[in-house]
Image: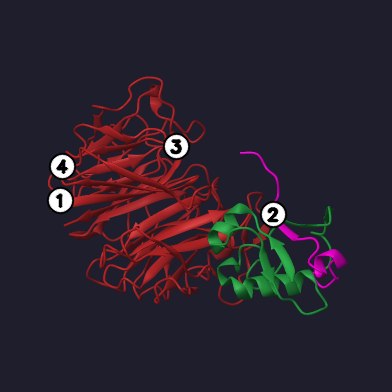
Amino acid sequence: MIRVALPAHLRTLARVSGEVQLEVPPPVTQRAVLDALEARHPVLRGTIREHGTLRRRAFVRYFACREDLSHESADAPLPDAVASGAEPFVILGAMAGG
Amino acid sequence: MSGVRILVGTRKGAFVLTADGKRTSWDVSGPHFAGWEIYHAKGSPADPDRLYASQSSSWFGQVIQRSDDGGRSWAPVGNEFRYEGVPGTHQWYDGTPHPWEFARVWHLEPSLTDPDTVYAGVEDAALFRSTDGARTWQELPGLREHGSGPHWQPGAGGMCLHTILQHPSDSARLFIAISSAGAFRSDDAGKSWRPINRGLRSEQIPDPTAEVGHCVHRIALHPSRPDVLFMQKHWDVMRSDDAGESWREVSGNLPTDFGFPIDVHAHEPETIYVVPIKSDSEHYPLDGKLRVYRSRTGGGEWEALTKGLPQRDCYVNVLRDAMAVDSLDPCGVYFGTTGGQVYASPNSGDAWAPIVRDLPPVLSVEVQTLR
């Protein structure tokens, strides 16, 4: 089971509390996780990735296992600890003031 | 029992202010969509329980919210705004070509007759329409594909389509305005468009009387006389008596004719309101005095409305979508400020009182008259 941690605004939008748990068949990649997340919560389409291009929105970041995976290929395998559910795949808004 | 419901969009959420017909005691609910920018929220003239709101964030993009019960509950609907075809380029601030990119919805204009039909004015400037209650959106590309499109440039706030006006009896006629391209009119329900900027003069562009390129801030009309348009331009308050074919300046005795909103009294089509702002480089009232100006002559002659408004040390702005009128008698006038105040006048502007003083910066104010 893949664990996904959403930022507060997107938890509110998707009406979930805590982490989202998803069944994702291997290979577990950013694209596979985000496809599964958006299939479970269609309201998140366009909020993490742009419509159409499916590019990561500029101020969204992906972290896992204390590493920034934002600039990794969408089709690269995620760390084993994410694939096994030991660690969450963290989606968050880039830090900014204001 | 009559009453009013004010939909307030702010930098950090939406607020709903309600009162009975006396408009002296207010209930405040919110923030709705807390932490998100609410550029605009507006109710359907055909069904007052149907509301639409534009919720956006630089981080998480655009969300459209819909309520079917007058704002007691909301649900996100469609948020995909895809330009038709290959969108091409417009001019960037430095004059270079820049690809058309969707950023956000500035303005939502529900149909006058069908609660499921709503128009959206977006940045980068384009007009979209939904006919299924905002579940899906289709661009009306004839506007963006007008031959002048590659020459449009953004204003300081972005290249936004911010004003959408519907003719009350001719559903084929629409008016829109873009900062900073100007005003356009369609006579075939949005299929084709032409600029309606003759008579505008803007010293800030290379050709001051160009067909496009004017920074129109807001247009308003009265439904009983839809060929009469009032415009607050970057500088200048303008009037057209022929559905935009020509414009003439009606700034008259205003202390400054820079500003953002303009609106028309609900029962007096020659009574209009503006909020003069010092200049394009100093976006606050002249001399620290917040004054609404009212003309009862359709422009030209203006009177300052000050009763109840701060007359010293006031340096807020009133943005283009942040003024509205109700249709009770006497007409109520409302506006919100970047300082978070929403002021109400239940007597056509003669006297004002704040409904709230400490909201986040107000982006938009719309009023529903409930009967």
- Dot 3 falls on a residue whose secondary structure is loop
Which amino acid lies under the numbered mark 4 shown in the image of this protein?
Lys
Marks 2 and 4: CB-CB under 8 Å? Answer: no
Closer to the chain start, of discs 1 and 3, is 1
- Are dots 1 and 3 on a single chain? yes
Residue at mark 1? B267
- Dot 1 falls on a residue whose secondary structure is loop
Residue at mark 2? A92
- Dot 4 falls on a residue whose secondary structure is loop
Which amino acid lies under the numbered mark 2 shown in the image of this protein?
Leu
- Are dots 2 and 4 on a single chain? no
On the question of residue B82 being in view, the answer is: no
- Are dots 2 and 1 on a single chain? no
- Are dots 3 and 4 on a single chain? yes
Task: Please state the extent of the stretch shown in magenta in the rendering.
Answer: A74-98
Residue at mark 3? B338
Residue at mark 4? B22
For mark 2, name the chain. A
Closer to the chain start, of discs 3 and 4, is 4
